[in-house]
Image (cartoon, rainbow, N blue to C red):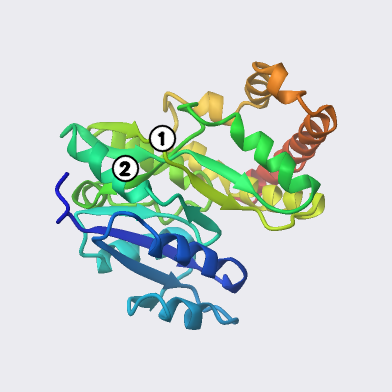
Amino acid sequence: MEKDSLVSIIVPTYNSEKFLEGCLESIKKQTYENIELVVVDNNSKDNTKEIAKKYTEKVFNKGPERSAQRNYGVKQAKGEYVIIIDSDMHLGEKVAEACVKEMQSDSKLKGLIIPEESFGEGFWAQCKKLERSFYVGVEWMEAARFFRKDVYELVGGYNEDLVSGEDWDLSQRIEKKGSLGRIEEYIFHNEGHPTLWGIVKKKYYYAGKFAQYTEVNKGAKNISRQTGIIGRYKLFFSDSKKLFKNPILGFGMLFMKTCEFGFGSGGYIMGKIKK
C-alpha cells in the first residue's frame, strides 16, 4: 500500500460539543498515519470550534446546511482521498487504512461504502442499533463515504439543494463514473440517549425535504426501494430470527419504525404541498 497517499477527513459540525470529542479522538487513533482533519462548523453557539481546534488548525465556518459544509471542506482538503463523516460518528481504528488499500487495489473504484453500526443509551438507542443492522450490505440503503477527491469534484460533490437523501444522490452520481466498493471495517454512529418523540420529529423534518431528492432522481434504479415502506418491513422480516431474538426489542423497533413512517409520510406530504 502506498503510505504517502494523503487522506482528508471532513467533519461538518453544528453545536456538536456533546459528541465531537469522541469523533475526533477516533480520527486521531487511525492506524493509517497520513491523514489531515478538516472541520467545517456552521456558526455553533457552544464550544464546538474550541474542541475542534485542539485537533486541527483547519477549522472553518460555512453554512447553511451540511452539504455545503462538506463541499467547502473538500475544497480546503489536500488529500488524494476524502472521507466524509458526521460529528456524531466514530471511525473504527482501521477504516482509513482499509479504504486506501481497497481503493488502490482496483482503479475502477471511485467510492467506498463503510458499513455503520449504532450505539447509545436507553431502549430507543438499542432499537436504532437493531434497525441499522438490517441495512449492512443492502445496496439500496447504504451510501459511500470515501471518495477519490478528483471524482468527487468532477461530479460536483453533494447537491447543496438537498437536505435529505443527499448521501444516496451523491453515491448514484459517483457510480456513473466507475464503481463503488466496500470495506469490512465499521463507522459507529453515536445515537446518544434518544427519545421516541425526538426520533419522529427528526423523521418529520427530513421527510419534508425528501421530495426534492425524489424529484432530482426520477428513474434512479433504487428510488422505489428507498421510498417504499412495505419493502422496508420486508427487509426487517427477512431475518425474523434476528428481529425477534429479543422480542421486546424487536417489537419496539417495529413500533418505532411505524411511528417514523407515519410522521415521515406526513412530513413528505407537507413538503410537497409547500413546494
Q: Quadrant of the N terminus?
A: top left
Q: Around disc 2, counting alpha carbons within 10 Å, would you say few (fewer than 14), some (14 to 19), or many (20 or more)?
A: some
Relative to residue 218, is residue 84 depicted above or below? below
Q: Around disc 1, counting alpha carbons within 10 Å, would you say few (fewer than 14), some (14 to 19), or many (20 or more)?
A: some
Contact flag, marks 2 and 1 (Cβ < 8 Å): yes
Query: What kind of element bears circle 1?
Result: loop
Given residues 2 and 150, the one toward you in this image is 2
Q: Position of residue 23 (x, y in %)?
A: 50, 62
- Amino acid tagged 2: Ala
Q: Residue at x 50, y 43 (%)?
A: 165
Q: Residue at x 69, y 23 (%)?
A: 242
How far separated are the C-alphas under marks 2 and 1?
A: 8 Å
Q: Position of residue 9 (x, y in %)?
A: 34, 60
Is residue 266 found left or right of 171 in the rendered image?
A: right
Relative to residue 254, is residue 60 depicted above or below? below
- Amino acid tagged 1: Glu
Given residues 130 and 206, the one toward you in this image is 130
Q: Position of residue 203 (x, y in %)?
A: 68, 47
Query: What kind of element bears circle 2?
Result: helix
Find disc 2 in the rendering and name its residue.
98
Given residues 7 and 175, the one toward you in this image is 7
**Residue that protrudes farthest toward the right in the picture:** 248
Find disc 1 in the rendering and name its residue.
184
Is residue 80 found left or right of 182 in the rendered image?
A: left
Hey, which quadrant is residue 179 in on the image? top left
Relative to residue 218, is residue 127 depicted above or below? below
